[in-house]
């Protein structure tokens, strides 16, 4: 009996099979979608094709004003005597997309002109333009437009504004939306 | 004699009973096995930021806008970069998976067309950081940035162009 049991116990063999390296292999693919954006904008440019020039004049005893319209007409107020020579409104050549609209901003305050040889000054104000300043007032009908700018020059007495050349700069802004 | 026979008979009876009991023990002792399984995190990729080339002035000759996965933007040919809004952004994706596992990152190999509804542009030469191909996941999540090249035609009509592309990942 005991002997028989022993035989049975010995014959119980252990088969150790190592399955440690039998991984469950996962083959998985996944993707995500990204969007692409790009914005192409036209070459919007503006250049001055004529400078604002009030021409030659002589101040009278009380001074006065020279009004130069965007349409190039000149009118005088007060004691200022217009001389000979050329004078003209400023003009700008604006280019961009066909039928694109844009905004025009003129100087909001007076612009100072300085005598080239001394400290005497004159001021320019009351700016006007064609097309009128404002948001979206400009229109590039065939991809371009000429903007004319006029203003008023305030002239003092001969003592305040002696003979000479007065120059200054101003900024006009064309804003493409 | 009768007495001896009886004794043998008893012994045999006991022996048969023992064998009957021991039979099941044989079938249970055939083998001992260890089975293993490794559970790994599923692989996923999700977009967090779209690819935007920003704004560019078109030219009278063709050119490109190149936006690298390192967020460097440059222009070639007749195209000029503009700083106007919206700003350029590289595409950004988040890859989630099991750390130390090898994966493959796949970017678009074909041209992708983007459109403003009427006109088209081609986007190609996609590249990424980490680069496309085999990559070993360092952590549970990895940030993937993708850049590409935008091809702008001469006098490309102005407008906002959009399109889409796919980035895929899989376990090796």
Image (cartoon, coloured by chain):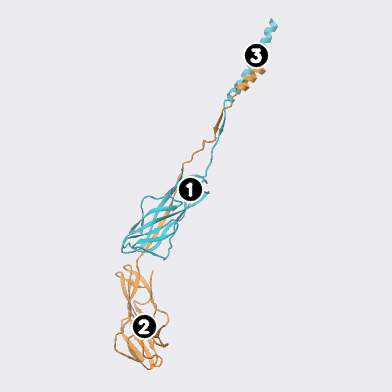
Chain colours: A orange, B cyan
Chain bearing tag 2 is A
How far apart marks 1 and 3 lie (CA) works out to 69 Å
Identify the residue position indicated by label 2 in the image. Answer: A151
Q: Image quadrant of residue A12?
A: top right
Q: Image quadrant of residue B146?
A: bottom left
Disc 3 residue crowd, few under 14, some 14–19, many 20+, Cα 10 Å: few
When the figure is inspected, residue B23 is found, relative to residue B85, above or below; the finding is: above
Discs 1 and 3 carry the same chain letter: yes
How far apart marks 2 and 1 lie (CA) works out to 67 Å
- Secondary element type, mark 3: helix
Q: Which mark is residue B84?
A: none
How far apart marks 3 and 2 lie (CA) works out to 135 Å
Discs 3 and 2 carry the same chain letter: no
When the figure is inspected, residue B108 is found, relative to residue B31, above or below; the finding is: below
Between residues A87 and A138, which one lies in front from this camera angle?
A87
Disc 3 + disc 2, Cβ < 8 Å: no
Chain bearing tag 3 is B
Q: Position of residue A162 (x, y in %)?
A: 38, 91
Identify the residue position indicated by label 1 in the image. Answer: B44
Q: Position of residue A42 (x, y in %)?
A: 35, 66
Which residue appears farthest toward the right when viewing the image? B3
- Secondary element type, mark 1: strand
Q: Position of residue A13 (x, y in %)?
A: 59, 24
Identify the residue position indicated by label 3 in the image. Answer: B13
**Quarter holding the C terminus of chain A?**
bottom left
Q: Image quadrant of residue B85?
A: bottom left
């Amino acid at each position: 009996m005991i002997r028989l049991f022993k035989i049975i116990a010995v014959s119980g063999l252990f088969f150790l099979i190592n399955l440690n390296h039998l991984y469950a292999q996962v083959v998985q693919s996944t993707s995500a979608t990204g969007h692409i954006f790009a914005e192409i904008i036209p070459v919007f440019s503006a250049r001055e094709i004529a400078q604002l020039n009030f021409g030659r004049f002589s101040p009278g005893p009380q001074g006065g004003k020279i009004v130069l319209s965007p349409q190039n007409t000149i009118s005088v107020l007060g004691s200022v005597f217009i001389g000979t020579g050329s004078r003209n409104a400023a003009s700008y050549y604006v280019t961009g997309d066909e039928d694109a609209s844009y905004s025009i901003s003129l100087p909001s305050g007076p612009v100072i002109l300085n005598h080239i040889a001394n400290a005497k000054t004159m001021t320019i104000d009351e700016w006007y333009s064609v097309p009128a300043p404002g948001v979206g007032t400009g229109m590039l009908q065939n991809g371009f437009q000429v903007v004319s700018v006029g203003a008023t020059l305030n002239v003092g007495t001969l003592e305040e504004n002696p003979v000479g050349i007065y120059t200054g700069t101003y900024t006009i802004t064309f804003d493409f939306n | 004699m009768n007495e001896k026979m009886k004794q043998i008979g008893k012994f045999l009876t006991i022996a048969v009973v023992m064998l009957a009991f021991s039979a099941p023990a044989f079938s249970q002792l055939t083998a001992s096995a260890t089975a293993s399984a490794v559970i790994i995190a599923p692989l996923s990729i999700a977009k967090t930021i779209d690819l935007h080339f920003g704004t560019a002035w078109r030219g009278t000759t063709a050119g490109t806008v190149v936006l690298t996965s390192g967020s460097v933007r440059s222009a070639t040919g007749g195209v000029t970069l503009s700083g106007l809004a919206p700003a350029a952004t590289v595409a950004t994706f988040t890859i989630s998976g099991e750390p130390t596992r090898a994966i493959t990152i796949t970017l678009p190999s074909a041209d992708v067309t983007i459109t403003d509804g009427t006109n088209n542009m081609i986007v190609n030469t996609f590249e990424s950081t980490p680069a496309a191909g085999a990559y070993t996941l360092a952590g549970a999540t990895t940030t993937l940035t993708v850049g590409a090249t935008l091809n702008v035609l001469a006098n490309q009509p102005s407008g906002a162009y959009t399109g889409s592309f796919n980035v895929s990942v899989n376990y090796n």
